[in-house]
Amino acid sequence: MISTANWWETGVIYQIYPRSFMDGNGDGVGDLAGITRRLDYLQWLGIDILWICPVFPSPMADFGYDISAYTAVHPLFGTMAEFDDLIAAAHRRDMRILLDFVPNHTSEEHPWFIESRSSRDNPRRDWYIWRDPGPNGGPPNNWLANFGGIAWEWDEATEQYYYHAYLKQQPDLNWRNAEVEAAMFEVMRFWLRKGIDGFRLDAIWHLAKDPLLRNNPPNPDFDPQRQRSYDALREIFSADHPDIHPILHRMRRLVEEFGDKILLGEIYLPPERLVAYYGSPRAPELHLPHNFELIFTPWRPEALAATIRCLEDQLPEGAWPTWLLGNHDRPRLASRLGPAQTRIAAMLLLTLRGTPTLYQGDELGIENVPVPKEHILDPWEKNNPGLGLGRDPVRTPMPWDESAYAGFSRVEPWLPLNQDWPQRNVAAQKKDRGSLLMFYRHLLDLRRSHAALTSGNFRLVQAGDGLLAYLCEQKRERMLVALNFEKDKKMLRPTGNCLGRVVLSSEGDRKDEIFSGQARLRPHEGLIIRLG
Ligand code: NOJ
């Protein structure tokens, strides 16, 4: 297929959580050499773009999202030479690499913060957000930290508070200081010079805050039984400040200095606010602002149709959507939706208009892995016990084969494997033509060979109760996708003149079956039908 679309529009992103992908040096933790060793697998699967979670020096208070040196590699993950090898090996396979960049905060052990906290008149004092106590002697305002508790930490030595949107070990940088921007842009240049293809920007909607530090208003819908303490307030003043946009525009210009490079961003905002992060044609910002709508929308056809329509309707001219159904922060897809729905989930993600991101292990249907209380590592869970927020269960090692420790490591891994690893692993599913893994591979292959599925127009169609159906259309190619969300059979009867042939069923059969305007879908079945 010859395509004129951009690589980041037609490509499929695969998120690698390096601690758990593949252990190359036998210490129980995944690393860069391990990723390089498994590139053949990713190529076989049909992946185009790898997003690699942080591999930089870090005290690991937040498992790498607390960075203490931006232009080095943590010895746990390997060496800079191994990083270079990974880029070269990926590029030889025509795969691109996106690096996770954490611009909002550093580790408290970063030399910049050590300097900043050393005295009130240190030249780097203003690189972070320091404030005197509020009028009552307590914190400067009511802002809360994402991971629990208040967002201000008292510094005994210099008698001021510093601000942290996440853990107290992750002080927020002050992007209103031009030196911070210059230093961070140099970090980006460092990695771009190494040949990476872009960045995933962590927590980017937190980058600038209200300069007056006004109190956040209470959230009238807050339910402490279900929600983390952070949700007691609405993050009106602490996040999504308009001053973020000019910074992102400058960041976009910076990456463009290096050619065809991209910015993917993490943004937990509703669609109407998220779309601002695309910028405008005159001042573009992110190429792909990740939205989490498919994770938060109830798994029902009408609700999903409304979500997809809502995002599509809000997209600025020329903006390209991007979708995901799982990541290293949210419960596993197979646990949220139930194993029976994993195939239509894959069909939805890989046929919607936009760039999809797969999270490692979802292609095997791994569920949340129970982690005994005494082994819990994730600070989010530790600070909010009992709410089911723990991220350890979704960060467990990739099971590669039937050998000891599932071929992930030679020793006991840092987190437990999925209990069903002897059956649910890459090698076993590769041998089974009916496995979820083989289905993903088939779907990815189909996607690549039909322009309508990668860069076509998208139109929802009425097709019957319990079903989500839509058309993907490009030039003369029209594909109808129909997904059954129910555990009962459903009749697919799309409106309009629809005749064609089945190209794929989630059950692996029915290929070439003639579609004469209606068809019965089995429980949880999805069909892709080529019309005309
Ligand atoms: C979002 C990341 O995905 C998450 O894992 C991390 O804990 C926070 N940002 C803080 O950096």
Image: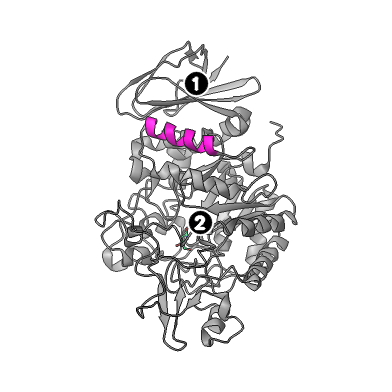
State the extent of the magenta-drawn residues as a range: 302-314
Question: Which mark lies nearer to you, 2 or 1?
Answer: 2
Q: Residue furthest left?
A: 225
Upstream in sequence: badge 2 or badge 1: 2
Residue 305 belongs to the span the image colors magenta = yes
From this viewpoint, is residue 378 visible? no
> Is 493 above or below relative to 411?
above
The picture places residue 144, in percent across and down from the top left corner, at 38, 66
Q: Position of residue 153 (x, y in %)?
A: 41, 77
Residue denoted by label 1: 511
Is residue 21 one of those drawn in magenta?
no
Q: Quarter of the image holding residue 110?
A: bottom right
* Secondary element at image label 2: loop
Q: Secondary structure at mark 1?
A: loop
Tell which residue pokes out farthest to the front in this image: 135
Task: Give the percent coordinates (x, y) of residue 406.
Answer: 42, 55
